[in-house]
Image (cartoon, helix red, strand yellow):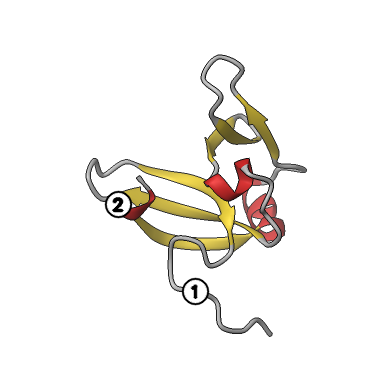
Amino acid sequence: MESTLKFIKTWEVAQFKAQQEVDKLEVKRNPHTGKVFFVYGCECGPCSRKVEEGLLTDPVVSQVCNAETGEMFMMLHQRGEGGAPTLAVF
């Protein structure tokens, strides 16, 4: 699925929390499906596999669009994952 996603805008976690006016992001697993998602305020969104696998070292939140369906949503993922790789951070 990730290959069909178009990344629209990306925020660092602190920026995203400030914009959404929330104190925290919580990563949870649905006990019935096993899917991992994150919760911010009363909203939720999917997480990338790196979150699920415990490989998240530089988290960011992106607004993404599924190119096949047009659905837009927020996704928690590793910086550089899915879009252009990060070459430097200043």
Q: Up-down: is 44 above or below 34? A: below
> Left or right: 55 with respect to 66?
right
| Nearer-N-terminus badge (2/1) | 2
Image quarter hosting the C terminus = bottom right
Three-letter amino acid code at the position of disc 1: Pro
Residue 32, position as x, y percentages in the image: 55, 14
Q: Up-down: is 33 above or below 71? A: above
For label 1, the residue is: 85
Three-letter amino acid code at the position of disc 2: Thr
Image quarter hosting the N terminus = top left
Residue 22, position as x, y percentages in the image: 71, 42
Furthest toward the left, the residue is 68
Label 2 SS:
helix
Verify CB contact (< 8 Å) between mark 2 and mark 1.
no
- Residue at 57% x, 53% y is 77
Q: Tell me which corner region of the image, top left, top right, bottom left or bottom right, holds residue 61.
A: bottom right
- Mark 2 surroundings: few (<14), some (14-19) or many (≥20) residues within 10 A: few
Residue 87, position as x, y percentages in the image: 56, 83
Between the C-alphas of marks 2 and 1, the distance is: 17 Å
- Residue at 49% x, 46% y is 74
Label 1 SS:
loop
- Mark 1 surroundings: few (<14), some (14-19) or many (≥20) residues within 10 A: few
- Front residue of 38/21: it is 38
Furthest toward the top, the residue is 32
Furthest toward the right, the residue is 23
For label 2, the residue is: 4
- Front residue of 78/8: it is 78
> Left or right: 24 with respect to 89?
right
Q: Up-down: is 37 above or below 12? A: above
What is the count of numbered marks? Answer: 2
